[in-house]
Amino acid sequence: MPESQPEHGRYLFAFARGLDPARLVGVLGLRGAPLEVVEHRDLQAVVCSVDLEEFGEDRLKEHLEDMEWLEEVARTHHDVVYAVSEVGAVAPTRLVTICSDDASVRGRVETLHTQLSEALSRVEGRREWSVKVYATRPAPPETVDAGRPASGAAYLQRKREQAAQRRSTGDQHLREADEIHQTLTRSVVATRVLQPQDPRLTGRADTMILNGAYLVPTEETDGFRAVVSRLAELNPTLEIELNGPWPPYSFATLD
Amino acid sequence: MSEIQSSVGGQLSVRDAGQISLVDLLDRLLGTGVVLAGDVLISLAGVDLVQIRLHALITTVRADMPVPRNLQGGGTDG
C-alpha cells in the first residue's frame, strides 16, 4: 500500500527521565532537524523527524554498508545521547529505531514503562568507562640453534616447543585479563565484557585481551581511575587503556 | 568530554581523547542499547549486526595501515 506510506518518521535517540528540554537547546538531531522531547507519564523520549526516503527500509540496507552514512548517523546519535546524559538519566536506543509518530512513541513508553524505569534507575548518576588491555607482542621464541635443524626430529621438536610457547602465552594473557577484570569488577556497580576488537579494527598489532565496560558512580570516578592506575603499575608488560566517561550504553538495556 | 588514559611500562598517561572511536561507538550502538519491537516502523533488531559492523569497519581501515602479521594468512599454529 504505497499510498499509505508516511513520509516522515520519529527517530528515537534515547529514553530519559528528569530531563529539562530547555537544556537541549542547540543540540541538533539528524540532518539538522531539531530535537524534540516526547513526554509520557514520568518518562521522556528524545526524538527528531527523519525523512523516510532516506531512513526507510528500502534504502536502509544500502546505507548501512555506506561507511560515511553510517558514521555520520552514529556520531549524531552519540552526540545527542551524550548531551542527554549530561542533563538527565538516559537509556540510549539501538541505532536507527524509528516510530511512525509520537503516539507510537508514547505507546512504546507505556508498554515498557516498568523495564525502562528500572533501566534508568540502574544507570542514574553513573557513567560507563571502557578499559581495554593489550598484550604487547610476545618475543619470538628463543632459538639457540637458529640454523638449519640437525634432523627432521629436531625440526619437529622445535616446532612443538614454539607451539607450546604460543599456547602458554595465550593462557597467560587469559589469566592476566581475568585478574584485571576481577579487580575492576570489585570496584564498580556493574560490568559487561565486550568482544575483544579485531586488530584490523583497532589498527594495532598488539592483541586485545580484554575489552570491558564498567559502570561507575560519578562520585567514585577518581577511585576507579586509581584502581586502573594501580593495575597498570602491577602489569608493566601490558598496555591498559582507560577511556570515558561515556553514556551508559552497555548497561541501560532492558531485561 | 571523554578522556583517554593509557599505560606504557606501567604508567598511565592521559592523552587527548578527541572523539570516541567509531569501532567503540558501533560496538555499543549496534551491540547494546534499548531494542524496540512491536509497533516500530524501522529497527535494526532483525539485521545481522555483526556482519554490518565488520563489513563497514574493515572498509574504513586506513590504506596505510600495515596488516598485522598474524592476519596475513598462514603462519599460525593449528
Image (cartoon, grey):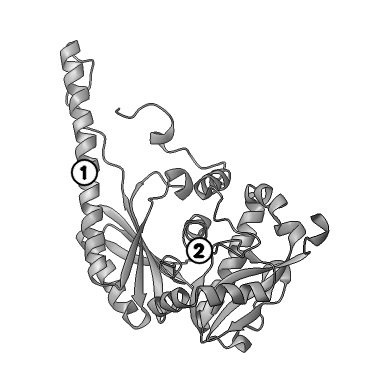
Q: Name the residue at 71% across, 76% down.
A: A34
Residue kind at label 1, given as amino acid type: Asp
Furthest residue in direction top, as rendered: A151
Q: In front: B60, or A211?
A: A211
State which mark lies toward you, 2 or 1.
Answer: 1
**Image x and y of residue A192, in percent:** 35, 62
Residue on which disc 2 sits: B20
**Image x and y of residue A198, in percent:** 43, 45
Q: In front: A157, or A194?
A: A194
Which quarter of the picture shows residue A74? bottom right
The kind of secondary structure element at disc 1 is: helix
Furthest residue in direction right, as rendered: A3
Q: In front: A236, or A188?
A: A188
The answer to whether tags 2 and 1 share a subunit is no
Q: Name the residue at 63% across, 61% down.
A: A73
In the rendered structure, find residue A171 and report the number of the disc placed on it: 1
Q: Is residue A148 above or below residue A221?
A: above
Label 2 to label 1, Cα distance in Å? 31 Å
**Image x and y of residue B44, in percent:** 58, 56
Q: Name the residue at 40% across, 80% down.
A: A121
Image quadrant holding the C terminus of chain B, namely: top left
Q: Is residue A40 above or below residue A164?
A: below
Q: Which chain hosts label 1? A: A
Is residue A190 left or right of B31 when viewed as pictured?
left
Mark 2, Cα crowd under 10 Å, few <14 / some 14-19 / many 20+, is some
Is residue A119 left or right of A144 when viewed as pictured?
right
**Image x and y of residue A194, in percent:** 38, 56
Q: Which chain hosts label 2? A: B
